[in-house]
Image: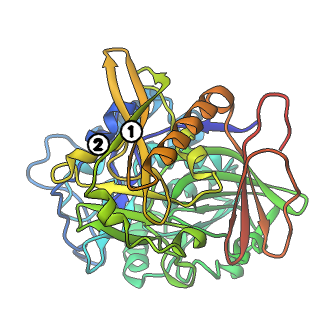
Amino acid sequence: MRSWRGEAESCPLDGWPLPATSRVQAAPFVTSALYRRRALRIPPMPVHGGHAMAGSALDTISAGEARARLVDQLIADGRITSPAVEQAFRRVPRHLFAPHDVSIDAAYADDVVVTKRGPDGRATSSISAPWLQAVMLHAARLRPGARVLEVGSGGYNAALIAEVVGPHGTVTSIDIDPDVTAHARAALDTAGYPHVEVATADAETGRPASAAYDAVIVTVEASDLPPAWLDQLAPDGTLVVPLRMRGNTRCLTFTRETDHLIAIDSIVCGFVPMQGAAADPVTRRALRGDEVTLSIDDPDTRALNLDALPTALSGPQIVAWSAVTIPPATSFDSLHLWLASQPLPYGQLAVDRDRAADLQPQNWVACPALLTDDSITYLSIRRLDDGTWQFGARGYGPQAVPLTRHLLGLIADWDRHHRSTPGPHIAIYPSGTTPPPTDQPCLVVARRHSTTTITWTTSGSRA
């Protein structure tokens, strides 16, 4: 059975996942506050004695107390659901993997810790939020004695994996950045995990020397599946990967089914993007300086001449509201993926809420938008009362009226046919393999190495 869970935690903000402390469980009216830009600045990771260590004179709690508090909270939140994962979190000292100027409180918060930034200030490496690490460990279905490849290093997650697979298991962690692997190696040694293998390698090639793996756990955003990952995965192995599909990233758990992979679990997430040969960044277009930008993640939309969109945004706004409502603290992440699955030009708006508040998108960082070459319409939401929020659409340009009307129809279709279902059927086929035909709504995302199909079924129908 597929399991689809909506989380608001990890959409990328300034290139790195948002901390759990900034989220309210996927509440529709929280997204504007959820994605507010913050003036957090974390310097490059200083190295002392070969590794970075957290802690300061301002700490008000010991590392052991902070670690116990974090684990207790993860259990209470339902993130940790097995004794093996609980034991791993109780044993691994997360603060030893954080930069030296990160406090014990911050090191053990259910939060992302950025460990390195690029010249543009965007994060290139981080320690993921513990709640998401716990979810991914469970998703990988690890067992004592398992062989595991981690793509995207940092040390802490590799140590957690090592605890779960035990002394007879093997863990290999790779990263393209030698600074990251050097830090991971030093921190793992200090923390008591010298047996974890750390290698500097491109994600595209994996680590064939230590294959075959019972699980491959990817901790960077990928848009494609390099053949090496599947070649090095055991026939009955599990692949856990944050996969970007037309701008929407989901952490998917894949297992093999004959000649392709099927997703058996999914959760909304965001990670630092892939580097190296597998890098495939989205295209960003400025529509109103840096106040409003549009991200595009498919070749058909990239091929459009969108030069008229900035002018359209300076014109009158069309606003229309659907009959679809939602209570607070309710997930609707499948709506975003449903809108992305349409055979129409599509992008995601990022809006500075302080300088372009007039646009009022449903999501200020990644709002679904339908396009023509001179018009745009995007998802919006408004509060009707304390217990009800209403979906709608806002549009600009000569085609705004029909485009907005079409978006309202898609919202109604989602509400009628897909809102209460387990979610779409997601499968990945190797390049050169033709996915089977279907009469159901289906998005096909063709990449260099693989083709992803996102098929929307209704009750009683088959993908």
Where 375 sits versus 280, above or below?
above
Residue visible at 47% across and 66% down in the picture: 373
Mark 2 or 1, nearer chain start: 2
Q: Position of residue 427 (x, y in %)?
A: 76, 55
Which residue type carries mark 2? Gln
Q: Are marks 2 and 1 in contact (CB under 8 Å)?
A: yes
Question: Which quadrant, please, contains the C terminus?
Answer: top right
**Circle 2: element type:** loop
Residue that lies at the very extreme toward the left in this rendered image: 57
Q: Quadrant of residue 462?
A: top right
Mark 1, residue position: 380
Q: Is residue 236 visible?
A: no
Pick whichever, 27 or 100, lies toward us: 27
Q: How is the image coloured?
A: rainbow
Residue occupying the point 73% across, 70% down: 450
Quarter placement of the N terminus: top right
Q: Nearer the viewer, residue 14 or 104?
A: 14
Q: What amino acid does circle 1 point to?
A: Ser
Tag 2 residue: 360
